[in-house]
Amino acid sequence: MIILEFLKLMRGENAVLISAILMGTLPFFIKSLSLSPISATFYRMSLGLLFVGLFLMLKKEKPVFSLSLVLLGLFNVSEVFFYITAITYLSAAMAALLLYMAPIYVMIYAMMRGKVSKHSVMALVLGIAGLYLLLMPEAKLSIGIVSGMLSGMTYAGVFIMLNRIGDHYSPIQITFSNLSVGTILLLPFQRFETGNLPLILGLGLIPTAIPFILLSYGMARVRVEKGPVIALIEPVTAGIVGFLAFGEVLSGVQLAGAAMILSAVFIALNEKGEQEV
């Protein structure tokens, strides 16, 4: 597998970056398919599991399960469900803003452990400020807003767990277990809605199977607070997708915010040293 061999040559930061760009295409699939949040989450989990299962067989690796992997799966399926719900009720960019409050929660966790660099703090402040300008948050509380906030909290849990267990299992094993938990939990609630088959398959591969493996690989090789800052490129991608596919226009202020986010990602990518946390 080209993707899996390519991982061996990739820096952790680059893996997180490519993962975030691919996950930024999620709004295109969700808005194009018009499925309920439960169905969209189930298809994403189950078809992602199918693709990762194929990768697992090709690599001749065995599935593994543990309490830590199950906890990761719980965080991940919650994050995916809440994010898809937010996308359903909000613009792609607004949903991404709330999801990417995750770096704040991760930074608080890292500060409690006393292992945060000045570069990471600077990149986070710049990135969050740019995120605010890019996505211009709404003031009214709604299902979409609450779901978006919960997606950010649970996404922080995903980053933290991946950083903690990344040295114990391969990226494919982690992703397989992760998606298995989500598929099993959602199966009783699935209504098997119909939709465009190529798009449903694409949902399982492009913003799910491939980037989840990349994220598992990358987060084991960067500091816990650094990964989410690099991943701020995802809402920029989501904003571009929203503009190109659905005509969600970016203003001058939003473009300035996107430039700030790209600057924050650049700072995080070029910080020297990759201390394990």
Image (cartoon, rainbow, N blue to C red):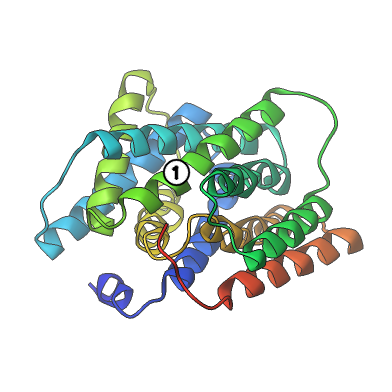
Q: Farthest residue toward the top?
A: 188
Q: Is residue 197 left or right of residue 88?
A: left
**Place of residue 209 in the rendered image (x, y in percent of width and height, measured from the top left):** 35, 54
* Quadrant in which residue 266 is drawn: bottom right
Task: In the rendered view, tell whether residue 191 sits above or below residue 134.
Answer: above
The residue shown at (33%, 25%) is 185
Locate the C terminus by quadrant.
bottom left
Which of these two is toward me, 218 or 34? Answer: 218
Q: Can residue 196 be seen here?
A: no
Within-10-Å neighbours for mark 1: few <14, some 14–19, many 20+: many
Q: Farthest residue toward the right?
A: 252
Going by the numbered disc 1, the residue's amino acid type is Val
The residue shown at (59%, 31%) is 150
Q: Is residue 18 left or right of residue 217?
A: right
Locate the N terminus by quadrant.
bottom left
* Quadrant in which residue 205 is drawn: bottom left
Q: Is residue 92 left or right of residue 114?
A: right
Q: Which residue is mark 1?
A: 158
The residue shown at (28%, 28%) is 184
**Place of residue 258 in the rendered image (x, y in percent of width and height, measured from the top left):** 76, 64
The residue shown at (53%, 43%) is 156
Could you tell me which secondary element the residue under label 1 belongs to? helix
**Place of residue 146 in the rendered image (x, y in percent of width and height, measured from the top left):** 67, 26
Task: In the rendered view, tell whether residue 266 sits above or below residue 226.
Answer: below
